[in-house]
Image (tube, rainbow, N blue to C red):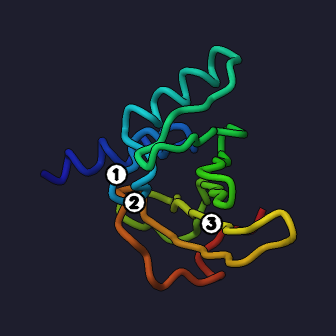
Amino acid sequence: MGGCLLSVTAQIKTAREAFSQMPDSILPYLTTNNRLDMLDFKDSNMRAVVQNKLGGNSELLTLADDSLTLQLSDALYLTMRVIPVAEETDGANQIIGLFCKIGIPSGLIEEKQLFYSVLWRKLDDVTLLLVKKS
């Protein structure tokens, strides 16, 4: 079983890999197929829009090696970052940060930050000491 964990952690190197491996329960707006379709559309230089589970449209706006940004609805945006860390967590020197913004055209209403290991285990105690300095 330990070898299996190592092979999973070794795969998380980019935001693309984290996004494709994300459990549906963490981002209930989108199914695994929705997320994979978005990546395929982006790779084909198409607008990466899919119909989400709530019947609205969600779009993958930006995709870089270490981050991506989604517009999940008219008022909900999510940025995912793969963050290098000094201390190993679940067999990797990376964690995944999800930064959610809920807003309306006149301003931001709420912002939330969540952190996960590369195995998608929620990390409740993430300190600035863990983050590697660039």
Tell which circle, 3 or 1, labels the residue nearer the N-terminal end: 1
Residue at (51% x, 59% y) in the render: 93
Residue at (59% x, 50% y) in the render: 72
Q: CA distance from mark 2 to mark 1?
A: 6 Å
Residue 108 percent location from the top left of the image = 78, 73
Tell which circle, 2 or 3, labels the residue nearer the N-terminal end: 2
Amino acid type assigned to the residue bearing label 2 in the image = Ile
On the question of residue 73 being in view, the answer is yes
Residue at (77% x, 66% y) in the render: 104
Residue 84 percent location from the top left of the image = 61, 59
Q: Is residue 134 above or below residue 87?
A: above
Q: Residues within 10 Å of mark 1 (few under 14, many from 20)?
A: some
**In the image, farthest residue toward the front:** 55
Q: Are marks 2 and 1 in contact (CB under 8 Å)?
A: yes
Q: CA distance from mark 2 to mark 3?
A: 12 Å
User: Residue 101's image quarter?
Assistant: bottom right
- At mark 2, the secondary structure is loop
Which residue in the protein does label 2 denote?
Answer: 26
Which quarter shows the C terminus? bottom right
Q: Indicate left or right for 101 with 13 as reference.
A: right
Which residue in the protein does label 1 denote?
Answer: 23
Which residue in the protein does label 3 denote?
Answer: 100
Residue 12 percent location from the top left of the image = 46, 45
- At mark 1, the secondary structure is loop
- At mark 3, the secondary structure is strand
On the question of residue 64 being in view, the answer is no
